[in-house]
Amino acid sequence: MAHPPPSSEGPEPRSKDPLPEALERLRGGRYGQQSLGAAGKYAGLGIQFAASILLFLYAGQWLDRRLGTDPLFLYVGVFTGAGAAFYSMYRSLMADQKREEEQQRKERER
């Protein structure tokens, strides 16, 4: 296999090694606590989403058994739970975005 001829300017400069920066983030340096905290928060949103749907699903099943309306309240429960979960997730994400924009605005003013 042929190699390209060496350039007359010397070797190409290497890009910055990303490993030290990644380790600093994990240790809680510049970005560490914020990014790990955000990951936990967003994972919690997913769990909250699933829990909301399941809670309303079981409430719908319970109502169906009590009233004898087989799948009606089950469907109402699932869609209500999904809607409530989407709304909660939307509010949380918009609040985070607003906080982040405010923080960036303050940093630009410095």
Image: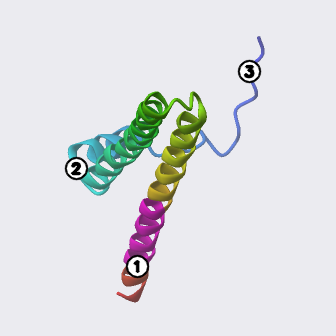
Marker disc for residue 28: 2
Residue 37, image x, y percentages = 29, 50
Q: Is 45 drawn above or below residue 51 in the view shown?
A: below
Select label 3 or label 2 by which is in front: 2
Give me the residue at 48% from left, 66% from top: 94
Magenta span: chief secondary structure:
helix
Which three-letter amino acid code belongs to the residue tagged 1? Glu
Marker disc for residue 110: none
Quadrant of image for the N terminus:
top right
Q: Is 108 drawn above or below residue 49 in the view shown?
A: below
Quadrant of image for the C terminus:
bottom left
Q: Which residues are magenta?
A: 91-104
Label 1 neighbour load within 10 Å: few <14, some 14-19, many 20+:
few
SS of the residue at dot 1?
Answer: helix
Select label 1 or label 3 by which is in front: 1
Give me the residue at 60% from left, 42% from top: 12
Q: Quadrant of residue 95?
A: bottom left
Q: Quadrant of residue 30?
A: bottom left
Residue matched to label 3: 3
Which three-letter amino acid code belongs to the residue tagged 2? Gly
Q: In the shown orientation, is residue 67 left or right of residue 34?
A: right
Which three-letter amino acid code belongs to the residue tagged 3? His
Residue matched to label 1: 102
Q: Is 109 drawn above or below residue 55 in the view shown?
A: below
Residue 27, image x, y percentages = 21, 44
